[in-house]
Structure formats: structure tokens, C-alpha cells
Image (cartoon, helix red, strand yellow):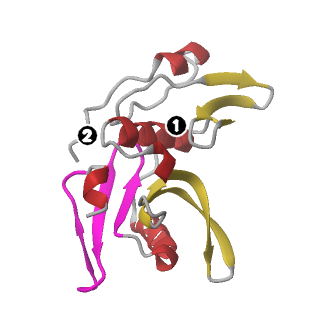
Amino acid sequence: MELKSALSVSSAFKKHFKPQRYKMRPLNLPTFDSKIKKTAEGLKIFDSLRRKYVALTPEEWVRQHFVHYLISEKKYPASLIANEASIKLHSLNKRCDTIIYSSALEPLMIIEYKEPNTAITQQVFDQIARYNITLKVRYLIVSNGVNHYCCRMDYEKMSFEYLEEIPDYSTLST
């Protein structure tokens, strides 16, 4: 992927963590001015899409950075991105980490996040493929914040191809 090289942890994160007590693996995503607060339940990070503070887990750290990257670098409209989107998979209710929609509100892309220390394995791809049974999107992305994989589905040929770069939003809808 042509993402920026590994960058240091943002100043907002450093403000709440003592480096010697907690080490966050640097992500292969641009930093951004995250809003983090300490609560009785632990640290929380503001999710601008859900418009609320959510638990700051390593996976959430990846999600917030990745969404920020899509909006600021790849020009994805924030209004067409949904975090923790509910879907029905057979008789089960599931949650996709992030879904990108078209201006007609049709799903275009599913993104699955893992924490930075989790390897991207076949099981991770199987998980996102199960979600895609229902949504039938054109693009799938899996990221642990360090490694990012994007593939484009071709339903006519019943195949897929890995892309060298995450597409800009304008490319998704064509």
C-alpha cells in the first residue's frame, strides 16, 4: 500500500500514557489530533462518526486512525462512513467494523480492523468474507494499523484482485 511510513503515536495519546508503562506500537497511518479522556471505566477516544467517546482499545486506536486517513487523505465523505454498522447474517446480528456507502446509501466497502499485534490471517479474511455474503460490496479491506490489504471483488468472474493502493472515494463509485 502507498500509505505513509510508520509514524509516532499522537501527542494526545502520549499525554495519557507513561511511555515506560505502556508502549503502543506505531501505526503505518498518519497521526491525527485525537480526543482522549480518562474516565472511571478507563481511557476513551472520541469517535467523530458515532459522535461519542468509546473505549480506547488497540483495535479502536487502529479504527480511528484508519477512518481519519480515509477522510483526510482519500477524500471519503464522513457522512457516508459507518462504524460498528449492524448487519443481519442469516439469523444472526453482526457488526461490521466500518462500512463505506455510496451517495445512494448502497454499501461499497467493508473494513475489518485488528489490533496491531494481531496477524492478518486467513481467519480474518474469512470473517470479512462472511459479512460480504450479505452486503456484496465491491471492496474489502483488512488492517491491523501496520499492514493493510485491499481487494476488489469481481462478481461476474467470481474472482478478486488485491490492489496496490487503497482507492480514493471517487474511484469507488465508478
**Quadrant of residue 21 within the rendered picture:** top right
The residue to which callout 2 is attached is 3
Image x and y of residue 5, in percent: 25, 32
Instruction: Please tell me which residue lies in front, 88 or 41.
Output: 88
Looking at this rendering, what residue extends furthest in the right direction? 40
Question: As drawn, is 30 to the left or to the right of 53?
Answer: left
- Residue type at mark 1? Trp
Residue 61: assigned label: 1
The residue that appears at 39% across and 27% down in the rendered structure is: 31
Q: Is residue 114 visible?
A: no
Indicate the position of residue 13 as horizontal and vertical percent values.
Answer: 53, 21
Q: Is residue 146 magenta?
A: yes
**Disc sitting over residue 48 in the figure:** none
Local crowd at mark 2 within 10 Å, few (<14), some, or many (≥20)? some
106 and 148: which one is in front? 106
Choose the circle earlier in sequence order: 1 or 2: 2
Amino acid at the residue labelled 2: Leu
Viewer-proximal residue, 57 or 140? 140
Task: Indicate yes or no whether the magenta region holds residue 129.
Answer: no
- Rendered position, 83 above or below 43: below
Q: CA distance from mark 1 to mark 2?
A: 17 Å
Q: Which residues are magenta?
A: 138-165
The correct choice, above or below, for 174 with respect to 69 in the image is below
The residue lying furthest to the front in this view is: 104
Q: Secondary structure at mark 2?
A: loop
Q: How many marks?
A: 2
Question: Where is residue 92, by image quadrant?
Answer: bottom right
Q: At 22% from the left edge and 51% from the top edge, which residue is drawn?
A: 165
Please name the residue shown 44% across and 36% down the image: 65
Quarter holding the C terminus? bottom left
Q: Residues within 10 Å of mark 1 (few under 14, many from 20)?
A: many
